Image (cartoon, rainbow, N blue to C red):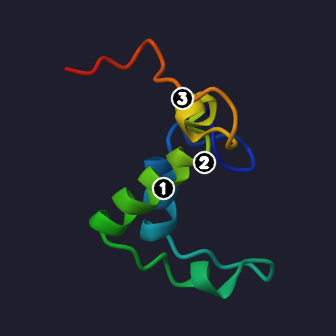
């Protein structure tokens, strides 16, 4: 999905790279972004992984994590050996 207020970024990594490499000078910019975003490659990877968990539809539909009392089965796409 495109990211950013105008959809110019094609990935979350592009967003982080943009704010990590460019100082933003605007009166409406948060002070954290004015002097570049101070994140390492590892931190960007961790943050990106976390953000993807917020829209993980497989997890959200997994009955193993459903409310207590509901059917608790393993989805057919998970193969246990």
Q: Which residue is mark 3?
A: 58
In the rendered structure, find residue 2 and report the number of the disc placed on it: none
In front: mark 2 or mark 3?
A: 3
Which of the 4 quarters of the picture holds residue 26?
bottom right
Counting from the top left corner in percent of width and height, residue 44 is at 39, 62
Q: Residue furthest front?
A: 69
Q: Which residue is mark 2?
A: 54
Is the Cβ of the residue at disc 2 closer than 8 Å to that at disc 3? no
| Measured Cα–Cα span from mark 2 to mark 1 | 7 Å
Q: Residues within 10 Å of mark 3 (few under 14, many from 20)?
A: few
Counting from the top left corner in percent of width and height, residue 6 is at 74, 44
Helix, strand or loop for disc 3: helix
Counting from the top left corner in percent of width and height, residue 52 is at 52, 45
Q: Which residue is mark 1?
A: 50
In front: mark 1 or mark 3?
A: 3
Q: Is residue 2 above or below residue 28?
A: above
Q: Residue furthest top?
A: 76
Query: 9 or 66, which is in the foreground?
Result: 66
- Residue 62 visible in the snapshot: no
Q: Earlier in the sequence, mark 1 or mark 3?
A: 1
Which of the 4 quarters of the picture holds residue 69?
top right
Is the Cβ of the residue at disc 2 closer than 8 Å to that at disc 1? yes
Q: Is residue 37 above or below residue 60?
A: below
Q: Residues within 10 Å of mark 2 (few under 14, many from 20)?
A: few
């Amino acid at each position: 999905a495109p990211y950013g207020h105008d959809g110019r970024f094609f990935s979350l990594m592009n967003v982080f790279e943009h704010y990590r490499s460019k100082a933003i000078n605007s009166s409406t910019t948060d002070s954290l972004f004015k002097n570049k975003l101070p994140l390492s490659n590892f931190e960007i990877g961790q943050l990106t992984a976390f953000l993807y968990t917020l829209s993980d539809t497989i997890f959200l539909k997994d009955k193993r994590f459903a409310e207590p009392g509901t059917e608790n089965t393993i989805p057919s796409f998970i193969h246990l050996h």
